[in-house]
């Protein structure tokens, strides 16, 4: 069973549909509005920052979920220089990207440990490594994820549960659409391939992680050779 959060987002939606077409058993979560289409009929509304909702969601799937891969796609960004930032906006980025992701991981782990199998995959970001002006909250949240998985990987390796992140560069779908065109062109000049990534690469990397039991506590760079 594959669980994907944020299926209305650019990447979450791409991944959901790719796994669905592959005939995988999959359950998606959406936040504000349910996406339309027969494939989404089992999708569940979930605010990942609400721990009781998260626990309820995991309880609701526990009796019929095996070989679970959890793909944490839900995330938000907030653009502001630190000295001008709104503290509530800043905190909500940490709350969704780091704490909300932790809630899901925390709730699903007992099930994975009981089943002696699990794959947890977080979508992190190159911004956690390089720093980009205006992204202190986002960078902190993604760097937090990358630190957090190191400990959780140690705690769960003996139960054959692996925990990894993918440090994404810039992709053709999703959040990139909120970046002004001029800035997009500037970013492309820093990418060896000179273009944003095709999300198929994210799908392939997820499949690699799923099929590689010795890989845990790792942050895989997937960024088209960005400098
Ligand atoms: N696209 C890129 O190039 C890129 C690069 C690096 C990292 N990433 C990471 O990859 C992931 C997916 O990115 P994306 O580009 O697909 O982003 P996106 O299009 O903005 O989608 C984000 C998704 O997260 C959901 N979400 C927001 N708050 C939530 C909450 N409290 N509870 C549950 N779901 C919530 C959104 O649902 P609503 O709209 O309904 O709120 C939406 O479905 C993110 O974690 C992002 O940081 C993306």
Image (cartoon, rainbow, N blue to C red):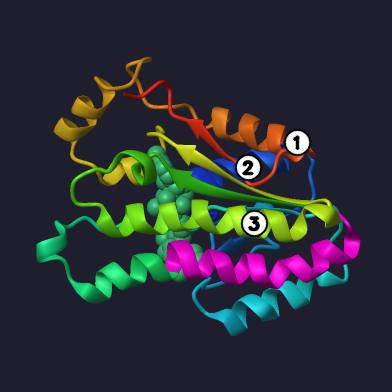
Q: Residue at x 76, y 77 (%)?
A: 59
In front of the other: 62 or 131: 131
Q: Position of residue 167 (x, y in %)?
A: 48, 39
Give the alpha-carbon distance from disc 3 to disc 1, as whole Å: 15 Å
Q: Residue at x 30, y 60 (%)?
A: 137
In front of the other: 180 or 129: 129
In the image, the residue with mark 1 has its CB under 8 Å from the nearest atom of ligand 1 = no
Quadrant in which residue 46 is drawn: bottom right
Label 3 belongs to which residue? 40
Q: Is residue 99 magenta?
A: yes
Which structural element holds mark 3?
Answer: helix
Q: Residue at x 79, y 44 (%)?
A: 24
Give the alpha-carbon distance from disc 3 to disc 2, as whole Å: 9 Å
- The mark found on residue 17 in the picture is 2
Which structural element holds mark 1?
Answer: loop
Which structural element holds mark 2?
Answer: helix
Location of ligand 1 given as a quarter of the image: bottom left
Can you name the residue that lies furthest to the top here? 193
Circle 2: is it few (<14), some (14-19), or many (20+) Cα within 10 Å? some
């Amino acid at each position: 069973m594959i669980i994907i959060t944020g299926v209305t987002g650019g990447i979450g939606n791409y991944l959901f549909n790719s796994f669905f077409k592959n005939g995988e058993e999959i359950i998606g979560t959406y936040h504000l509005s349910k996406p339309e289409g027969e494939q989404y009929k089992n999708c569940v509304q979930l605010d990942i920052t609400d721990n009781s909702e998260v626990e309820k969601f995991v309880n609701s799937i526990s009796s019929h979920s095996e070989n679970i891969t959890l793909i944490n796609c839900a995330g938000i960004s907030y653009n502001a220089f630190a000295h001008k930032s709104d503290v509530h906006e800043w905190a909500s980025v940490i709350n969704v990207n780091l704490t909300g992701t932790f809630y899901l991981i925390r709730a699903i782990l007992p099930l994975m440990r009981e089943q002696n199998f699990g794959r947890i995959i977080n979508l992190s970001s190159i911004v956690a490594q390089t720093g980009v002006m205006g992204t202190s909250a986002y960078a902190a949240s993604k760097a937090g994820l990358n630190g957090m998985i190191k400990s959780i990987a140690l705690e769960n390796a003996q139960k054959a549960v692996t925990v990894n992140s993918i440090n994404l560069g810039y992709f053709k779908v999703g959040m990139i659409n909120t970046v002004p065109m001029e800035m997009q062109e500037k970013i492309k000049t820093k990418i060896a391939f000179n273009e944003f990534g095709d999300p198929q690469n994210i799908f392939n990397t997820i499949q690699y992680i799923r099929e590689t039991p010795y890989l845990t506590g790792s942050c895989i760079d997937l960024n088209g050779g960005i400098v």
